[in-house]
Image (cartoon, rainbow, N blue to C red):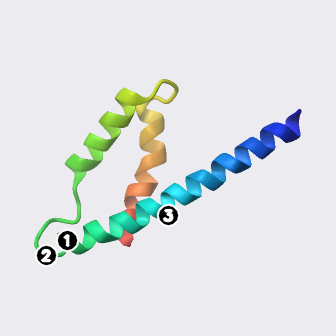
Amino acid sequence: SLNAYIIQIDKIDDQLLELLEKRKLITKMVKKLKKKGLDLEDIERENTVLDRLSDKSRKLKRDDLEKIYQPIFTISKKI
């Protein structure tokens, strides 16, 4: 039923939120290390992440992944 799918989507959203919060904590630690002399902007790393995920994905194209991850990258830089 529709409600069963909605419940599944809600559970996935909860998992995504938890993972994004974990990512934020790790990004905060990385930022502290980078403040010690490394550049905070790392376009090469972002492209490496997108390439890796694009190669791994069976359902999402790189363009879709960029649309999802660019805001994540942007928010991560503001931490």
Taking 39 as reference, is 18 left or right?
right
- Specify few, some or many for label 1: CA neighbours under 10 Å numbering under 14, 14-19, or 20 or more: few
Is residue 27 visible to us here?
yes
Q: Which residue corresponds to mark 2? A: 36
Numbered label attached to residue 51:
none
Identified by mark 2, the residue type is Lys
In-front residue for pair 76/5 = 5
Instruction: Residue 58: give x, y in percent of width and height.
Output: 48, 24
Name the residue rendered at 37%, 71% in the picture. Answer: 78
- Depicted 8 relative to depicted 70: above or below: above
Identified by mark 1, the residue type is Leu
Contact between labelled residues 1 and 2, with CB atoms less than 8 Å apart: yes
Instruction: Residue 53: give x, y in percent of width and height.
Output: 38, 36
- Specify few, some or many for label 2: CA neighbours under 10 Å numbering under 14, 14-19, or 20 or more: few
Q: Which residue corresponds to mark 1? A: 33
Quadrant of the image for the N terminus? top right
Name the residue rendered at 48%, 36% in the picture. Answer: 64
Q: Which residue corresponds to mark 3? A: 21
- Specify few, some or many for label 3: CA neighbours under 10 Å numbering under 14, 14-19, or 20 or more: few
Mark pair 2, 1: CA separation: 6 Å
